Every structure is written in structure tokens, then in C-alpha cells.
Image: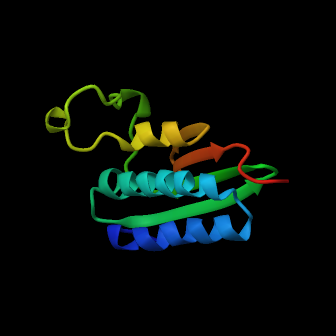
Amino acid sequence: MAGTLAELPRIVEFVESACEQTAIDPSARFDLQLAVEEACTNVIEHAYNGKGGELTVCFEVCGPDVQITVTDQGQSFSPDEVAVPDLNLPLEERPVGGLGIFLMHQLMDEVEFVFSAEGNRLRMVKRGVRSS
């Protein structure tokens, strides 16, 4: 699918539909949707510099868990170099952005980035969200 900001609603709808079809606990659906939206927004804005590019979102059920993989061919980065946001600062003093990776880690049980010559892959896992 096209990795553009205009496609974000369609990507979120895909996750919502996959959750419904696979009987994901309704309380976990928002977390999954938000984590994917943040991941795809980061790819579009940073890996593709806002110009868009090819993006793949894969939704897999593994027993009671869900694994979502986002792949792209954009510019890679070092997740360890992304500063953890200071949530104690007043809103008006916080820099714009910088919450995406933090939110993914808060919403998901596993977040793993892999960068290679074949492209970039983000794997996120949420445990115990489905009756197996």
C-alpha cells in the first residue's frame, strides 16, 4: 500500500477490521490501532521524508497474541538514539513530536526494529488479547 498521510485512515481501518475478524479483545483494539498509526506516521514523515513510499502492514494472530509488522524501503535510523520524551515538562515547553516510539513501547509488549539492505522492519507484539 502507499505510505502517505492520506492513506493513514485506510491503514487504521485495516487494523480495526483485522481485530474484528480475529476476535481481538475490544479493550486492546485502540492500542493496536494507535501503535500502527504512530509507526506508519513515523515511516511516512521520517523514512520517506514526507514524500511517501511503499509500506506494508502485516497483522498476524499467534494464539492469544497479535504480531503486527510494518515494513518499508525508506531511510533507516537508530532507535537507541531517539530521546525519551520528558513528560514532566509543561506542554508548552515540550518539543513537537518525539512521542511515537515512546507510545509504541507503552502500548505494545514487544517492539523490535530491524534494518537491512532489504529494507526496514518494525515488529510489534501485544500479548493476551485474544481467547485461543
User: Looking at this rendering, what residue extends furthest in the front direction?
Assistant: 27
Q: Is residue 125 left or right of residue 40?
A: right
Give the residue displayed 57% in from the left and 42% down from the top. 108
Place residue 14 in its image quadrant. bottom right
Place residue 103 in its image quadrant. top left
Give the residue displayed 50% in from the left and 37% down from the top. 106
User: Looking at this rendering, what residue extends furthest in the right direction?
Assistant: 132
The picture places residue 41, in percent across and down from the top left corner, at 37, 56
**In this view of the protein, which residue sits in the foreground, 118 or 52?**
52
In the image, residue 132 sits, relative to residue 107, either above or below, namely: below
In the image, residue 5 sits, relative to residue 32, either above or below, namely: below
Give the residue displayed 33% in from the left and 67% down from the top. 5
Q: Is residue 4 left or right of residue 110?
A: left
The picture places residue 116, in percent across and down from the top left corner, at 52, 44
Give the residue displayed 44% in from the left and 58% down from the top. 37
The picture places residue 112, in percent across and down from the top left corner, at 57, 38
The picture places residue 97, in percent across and down from the top left corner, at 26, 44
In the image, residue 121 sits, relative to residue 23, either above or below, namely: above
Place residue 89 in its image quadrant. top left
Whether residue 13 is visible, yes or no, is yes
Q: Is residue 60 left or right of residue 97?
A: right
Q: Is residue 88 left or right of residue 68?
A: left
